[in-house]
Image (cartoon, helix red, strand yellow):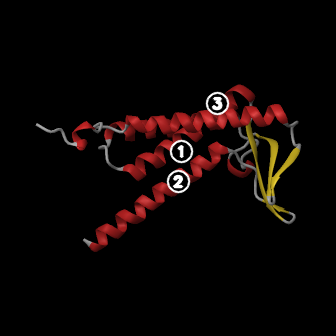
Amino acid sequence: MSIQLKDKLPRNNWGWLYASVAVLMADQISKALVTHRLAPYQAQALLPHLNLITMHNTGAAFSMFAQAPALVFLVLAAAVSAGILYWLHRNPHGQHLLAAGFSLILGGALSNALDRVTRGFVVDFIDFYIGHWHFAAFNLADAAITAGAGLLIMDMLLQARSSRSG
């Protein structure tokens, strides 16, 4: 009697939490390395158009809402995390784009929330620029959240496409 591979796959999405943990750890380690090496607001060139820089972000994306209390961001991170954990628990295994997207968002949100709790601000350190124009500094957690959102959009577009064609 042979056991097929699909019989060995988990019936839930909890395994995707490893991606969340990997994002959280990579982000926290990279922030620790950068803050240990560079003084606040000190830049170090890495590549053309790319610097490392230690920035302290008290706001949300692109420093929006910088005057909002940290509790607002912590409540938001808790609500997003609870919603993602609920989705991972309730939905069937096999929706890989959604599960990966949600897991990346969860890891990034938790890592930035951990910064707010332990430091009072989020450490941003990736500075992309062209000429004198600089994109807002960001970190690996922000990149994971953005990639996760991109995966959610891709899944939505693929679902819409498949429902139109079939």
Task: Give the secondary structure at mark 1.
Answer: helix
Q: How many marks?
A: 3
- Looking at the rendering, in which quadrant would you find the C terminus? bottom left
Kindly identify the amino acid type of the residue bearing the numbered disc 1: Ile
Q: Which residue is mark 3?
A: 114
Mark 2 residue crowding within 10 angstroms, few (<14) / some (14–19) / many (20+):
some
Instruction: Tell me the residue at 58%/52% (across/down).
Output: 146
Q: Which residue is mark 1?
A: 105
Q: In the rendered structure, are the residues bearing label 1 and label 2 in contact, judged by CB atoms less than 8 Å apart?
A: yes
Q: Is residue 105 visible?
A: yes
Q: Amino acid at mark 2?
A: Ala
Q: Is residue 148 above or below residue 54?
A: below
**Where residue 35 sits: x, y (%)?**
80, 34
Question: Quadrant of the image for the N terminus?
Answer: top left
User: What residue is shown with label 2?
Assistant: 149
| Cβ atoms under marks 3 and 1 closer than 8 Å | no
Give the farthest residue toward the front.
1
134 left or right of 142 in image: right
Q: Earlier in the sequence, mark 3 or mark 1?
A: 1
Location of residue 72 (image quadrant): top right
Tell me if 110 is positioned left or right of 30 in this view: left
Residue extending farthest left: 1
Snapshot quadrant of residue 56: top right
Q: Which one is earlier in the sequence, the residue at label 2 or at label 3?
A: 3
Cα distance between the residues tagged 3 and 1: 14 Å
CA gap, disc 2 to disc 3? 20 Å
